[in-house]
């Protein structure tokens, strides 16, 4: 995940938090003052964002040396140490909040994703995310979803044809919207159509949609739709699916469940940086 886009996001975050400097840390600690810090988990969580955290420390001051004590995707218990950093104290404290913001957000999403993935284990249904991501953070948040064991839906509007209700309403016809997309899409591209009723499911099948998204249907309605589709299209479910009802939707014939809550409702993981000064060498 250490791409130019990630570096740009880190720089924006540091400019936001420390663009005017860190008046407190610089006042207390001279340049020669050094410390060692450790980041530890305060809850059970799935770790995500360690390399990003290390890059933040390096962007603040290359003299800050980090050692990763875990790997992204590790499930850790409270008290587990996941990163060690050593170097100038003032720089370490300047980087602290930005480092933790990245780690807490990404680990929170990974932890949420792991919970959802575990909930459907053994069903053959795949849980994927949506485009309901923090602006600018999409690549990182989708990486966190994968780290937690779920999958990614499209990352941008240009990656996948998905005809939704507003497309159909504005085009005045589901069949017309499908025909126009099929004519314009790259060779071999699959067409996905959102359907809210069994009538729309049947219309999508007549239009030869390869993927049908069952939107805001109840488990009983999904069961009826799956019977109508009868394997002629990939079945995706979205809308109205809660964690408590997830297993009711993960029924035979359902291939994918897309859930925006993987990203937009993930709670930040509880992580902390504890700093201790290094002893000065004896003269």
Image (spheres, grey):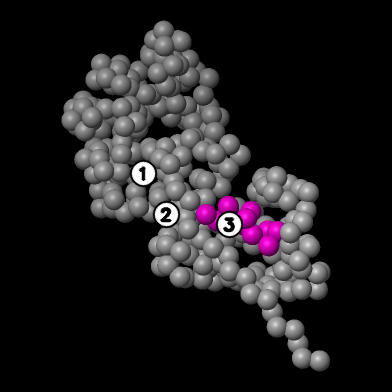
> In whole angstroms, how far apart are the C-alphas of marks 1 and 3?
27 Å
Q: Which residue is mark 3?
A: 100
Identify the image quadrant of the C terminus: bottom right
Q: Which residue is mark 1?
A: 127
Q: Is residue 267 above or below residue 46?
A: above
Q: Position of residue 189 (x, y in %)?
A: 47, 30
Q: Is residue 278 above or below residue 244?
A: below
* CA distance separating discs 3 and 2: 16 Å
Whether residue 213 is situated above or below residue 273 in the rendered picture: above
Q: Is residue 101 magenta?
A: yes
Q: Main secondary structure of the magenta part?
A: helix
- Residue beneath disc 2: 111
Q: Secondary structure at mark 1?
A: strand
| Left or right relative to 133: residue 78 | left
Instruction: Select label 1 or label 3 by which is in front.
Output: 3
Q: From what the image shows, is residue 203 above or below residue 157?
A: above
Q: Secondary structure at mark 3?
A: helix
Q: Can you see residue 147?
A: no
Give the mark count.
3
Residue 204 lies in the magenta stretch: no
Label 2: few (<14), some or many (≥20) within 10 Å?
A: many
Tag 1 near tag 2, CB within 8 Å: no
Residue 149: % across, % down: 40, 53
Q: Which residues are magenta?
A: 93-104
């Amino acid at each position: 995940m250490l791409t130019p886009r990630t570096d740009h996001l880190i720089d924006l975050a540091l400019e936001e938090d420390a663009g005017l400097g860190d008046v407190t840390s610089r006042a207390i600690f001279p340049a020669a003052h050094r410390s060692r810090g450790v980041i530890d988990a305060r809850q059970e969580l799935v770790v995500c964002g360690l390399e990003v955290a290390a890059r933040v420390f390096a962007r603040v001051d290359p003299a800050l040396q980090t050692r990763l004590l875990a790997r992204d995707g590790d499930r850790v218990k409270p008290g587990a140490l996941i990163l060690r950093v050593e170097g100038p104290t003032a720089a370490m404290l300047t980087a602290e909040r930005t480092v933790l913001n990245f780690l807490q957000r990404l680990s929170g999403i990974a932890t949420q994703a792991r919970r959802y993935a575990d909930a459907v284990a053994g069903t053959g249904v795949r849980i994927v995310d949506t485009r309901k991501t923090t602006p600018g953070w999409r690549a990182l948040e989708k990486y966190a979803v994968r780290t937690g064991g779920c999958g990614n839906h499209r990352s941008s509007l240009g990656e996948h044809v998905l005809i939704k209700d507003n497309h159909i309403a504005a085009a005045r016809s589901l069949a017309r919207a499908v025909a126009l997309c099929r004519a314009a899409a790259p060779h071999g591209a699959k067409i996905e159509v959102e359907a809210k009723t069994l009538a729309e499911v049947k219309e999508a099948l007549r239009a030869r949609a390869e993927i049908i998204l069952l939107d805001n249907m109840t488990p009983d309605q999904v069961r009826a739709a799956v019977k109508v589709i009868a394997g002629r299209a990939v079945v995706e479910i979205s809308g109205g699916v809660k964690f408590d009802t997830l297993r009711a939707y993960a029924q035979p014939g359902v291939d994918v469940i897309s859930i925006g809550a993987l990203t937009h409702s993930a709670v930040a993981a509880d992580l902390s940086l504890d700093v201790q000064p290094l002893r000065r060498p004896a003269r």
